[in-house]
Amino acid sequence: MPQYQLRVYTLRSPDALTAYEKIWGRHIPGMAKHRITTHGVWTVPAAPGSETFRLYALVSYKDADDVRERLEAYLASPEFRADMEGFDISQIVGLDETLLTPTVESPLR
């Protein structure tokens, strides 16, 4: 059964969120080369009066793959460096990673 991961990025500003949304579009093919499948990427508008700008990504890894190993391989790749070129990484102010286990009835099993 694949291992799923919900990745939640908190960005510094609406402009940073917009820029990172475009970068995620470029991440998808590079991640696939490293056996990481992207199932969806979403942005969440900040609530009125809130300064929280988030991007959510749902990815999966093959059954036997070590999640940390796959992710570190991608982060060290030329594809990742090219994707991030020109983006100030300090615009990402938070990252939460949650491994998810599909239920027996889940279509993503």
Image (spheres, grey):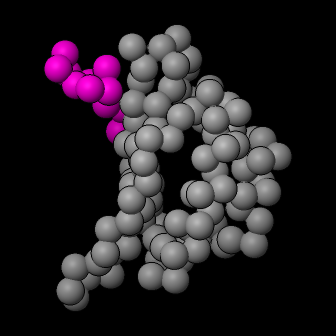
Query: Which quadrant would the N terminus be assigned to in this image?
Result: top left
Indicate the position of residue 69 as horizontal and vertical percent values.
62, 26
Looking at the picture, tell me which residue is in the foreground, 93 or 35: 35
Indicate the position of residue 2 as horizontal and vertical percent values.
42, 20
Looking at the picture, tell me which residue is in the foreground, 88 or 17: 17
Which residue is found at the position 77% from the left and 47% from the top? 79
Which residue is found at the position 64% from the left and 35% from the top? 32
Looking at the image, which residue sits at the far left? 105
Answer yes or no: is residue 73 visible.
no
Q: Image quadrant of residue 108? A: top left
Give the answer, above or below, for where 39 lies relative to 84: above
Is residue 20 on the magenta stretch?
A: no
Looking at the image, which residue sits at the far front? 107
Please indicate whether residue 94 sits to the left or right of residue 89 in the image: left
The secondary structure that dominates the magenta segment is: loop
Q: Image quadrant of residue 52? A: bottom left
Which residue is found at the position 53% from the left and 34% from the top? 37
Which residue is found at the position 62% from the left and 62% from the top? 23
Please indicate whether residue 88 sits to the left or right of residue 102 in the image: right
Please indicate whether residue 74 sits to the left or right of residue 57 in the image: right
Indicate the position of residue 73 as horizontal and vertical percent values.
70, 33
**What's drawn in magenta, residue-wise?**
98-109
Answer yes or no: is residue 9 visible.
yes
Please indicate whether residue 96 sits to the left or right of residue 65 in the image: left
Query: Which quadrant would the C terminus be assigned to in this image?
Result: top left
Looking at the image, which residue sits at the far bottom? 49
Is residue 108 on the magenta stretch?
A: yes
